[in-house]
Image (cartoon, rainbow, N blue to C red):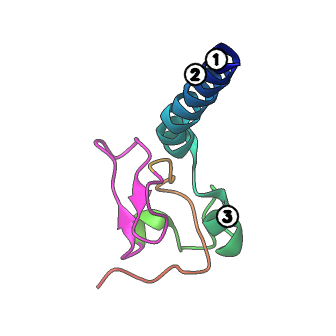
Amino acid sequence: MTENTNQTRRNLLKLGSIAVAMIPMAALAAKNDAMRTAMKYKDTPEADKQCSGCMHFVPGKTPNDPGGCKLFPGDTEVSSKGFCTAWAKKP
């Protein structure tokens, strides 16, 4: 009976450690889809309004690389030519 209990406990610990290890991987893969949907984000500009002219936009390494947005934490795939309803002109 003790051997069976130990084996069950080992299996539980293995599964728990695998689940904990997967959390950061899931967080890295996320693009903050919920926030993008709420802000009606799209990869195309709206008239003369685009992310590169917004005060919330964080540029990528080069002008052609995707950047980030202060409103989408952890999201590094924001197009400089994109647009959302939170757009605010840079001062």
Picture quadrant of residue 64: top left
Residue 80 vs 29, above or below: the answer is below
Q: Which residues are magenta?
A: 54-75
Do the residues under discs 2 and 1 have CB atoms within 8 angstroms? yes
Q: Which residue is mark 2?
A: 10
* 28 with respect to 3 (left or right): left
Cα–Cα gap, marks 1 and 3: 40 Å
* 70 with respect to 31 (left or right): left
Dot 3 falls on a residue whose secondary structure is helix
Asked if one can make out residue 60 in the rendered structure from this viewpoint, the answer is yes
Q: Which residue is mark 3?
A: 34
Quadrant, the C terminus: bottom left
| x then y, percent, for residue 71 | 46, 72
Cα–Cα gap, marks 2 and 1: 5 Å
- The question of residue 40 being in magenta is answered with no
Instruction: Give the mark nearer the N terminus: 2 vs 3.
Output: 2
Q: Which residue is mark 1?
A: 7
Instruction: Tell me the mark number nearer the camera, choosing from 2 and 3.
Output: 2
Dot 1 crowding, Cα within 10 Å, few <14, some 14–19, many 20+: few
